[in-house]
Amino acid sequence: MNAHMLSRFHYPFPVLKNPFADTLQEITDNQWIDGEYLWLYKDDPDTRQKYKRTKTAHIASQWFPTASLERLQPICRFMLWTLYNDDKYEEGTPEESRIVHEQSVAVLRGDLTAEEAQIPLGGLLASLRAELLQFISIESLHRFIAALDKYFRGLEQELIYKSRKTFPTIEECIAIREDSLCLFPFLELADVETKLPLPADIYKHPVIQRLKALASRMMVYFNEVQSVIKDEATDSIYYNVVKVIQHNRNLSLEEACLEDLRIHNEALEEFLDLQRALPDFGEWHDAVVNRVHYISMTLSGWKNVSSKMERYNSLNGFPSAERVKSVINN
C-alpha cells in the first residue's frame, strides 16, 4: 500500500541535485562515520553501514543544489547529526531529551565547549558552529539555533506522548511534527547557499513564516505514510499523523492515509496560492521569490531522494533500539 499511496503525492517543483553529492558522501562515510565519529558505533559495522546507506549527503544535495563544495560541507555534517540525534533520543526519555537540548544549544551558541557539554554529539556541533561561521553572520546562526530549539521542543513532546502511550489530537500532532521534523533549521541555512542574507523583517514576515510551516507540514504528511510501518514496529505510533488520524477517527489504515493525503493537498494548494501572490518586498522581491523556490524544492527533492533509500522504505535501514540506547548511556 505504501508505494501506491506515496505515488499520489505530487509536487509541481523542479528537482535539482548538487554535483558535489558523491564527494561529500565520501567525506561523510570515510572521514565522519568511520573517522571522527567512529567511536559512536566502533564495534558495530552494521549500524555504521546503515547510516552510510542513508546517503545523508545526497539528501542535503537535493535541498542545497547550488551550494559550493565548501558551503555544502557543514550542511552535510548537520544532516548526519539529525539522523544520529533522532535515532538516539527517540528511544530516550523526555528528561534525557531536555538535557541534550539545553547542552546542544549551548554548544552552538558558544556558551559551552564540547567537553563541557558532555553529550555524545557535542564535538560534532562544535565543528558545525565553527564551519557555519565561515559563511554566515552571527544573526543567521542565531536564527538557525532558534529553529533547532523548535525541533527539540517537538521531540520532547513526542517522547511525552510515547512515554504515556497516549495519542494527541490530530491538530496537536501536526503542530508537534511540524517542529520535530527538523526541516526549519535547514530552511534557516539558506543563507549558506544563496550568500544573500535577507533583512530581518523579511524572515519574520507572516507569509514567509507560513510558507515554511506549510513546507514542513507537507513533508510530515508524506513522511508519515512513508514511515507508518516502521513506526508501528518501533512503538512510535503516538506521534505519527496517520496513526493519530486512524485512532481519533476510528478509520482503517488506508482511510487514514487518504485523509493524510487530503490534508497534504490542501496545504499544497495554500502554498502555491501564497507563492503566486507574494507581497511586494520592494528591492528584495526577486531575492524573496528565489528563496521561496528553494523552500519548494525541499519537497520535490525529499520525495525524489527518500524513495530510493532503505531507511525510509523498510525496517532494515534503522539501527536497533538496543544499540542506540547503549550509545545514549555511554
Image: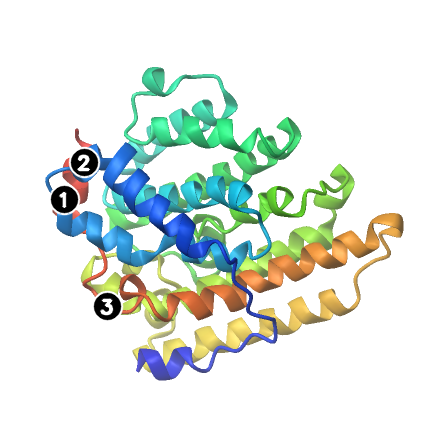
Give coordinates of residue 35: x percent, y percent.
Answer: 26, 36
Q: Which mark is residue 314?
A: 3
According to the image, label 2 marks what residue? 327
* Among numbered discs 1 and 3, the one appearing first in the sequence: 3
Q: Quadrant of residue 119?
A: top left
Q: Nearer the viewer, residue 136 or 322?
A: 136
Q: Amino acid at mark 2?
A: Val
Q: Amino acid at mark 1?
A: Arg
State how far apart marks 2 and 3 are (Cα). Answer: 23 Å
Give coordinates of residue 83: x percent, y percent.
Answer: 33, 47
Q: Quadrant of residue 233?
A: bottom left
Q: Secondary structure at mark 3?
A: loop
According to the image, label 1 marks what residue? 323
Q: What residue is shown at x 17% (from left), y 31% (from top)?
A: 329
State how far apart marks 2 and 1 are (Cα). Answer: 7 Å
Q: Amino acid at mark 3?
A: Ser
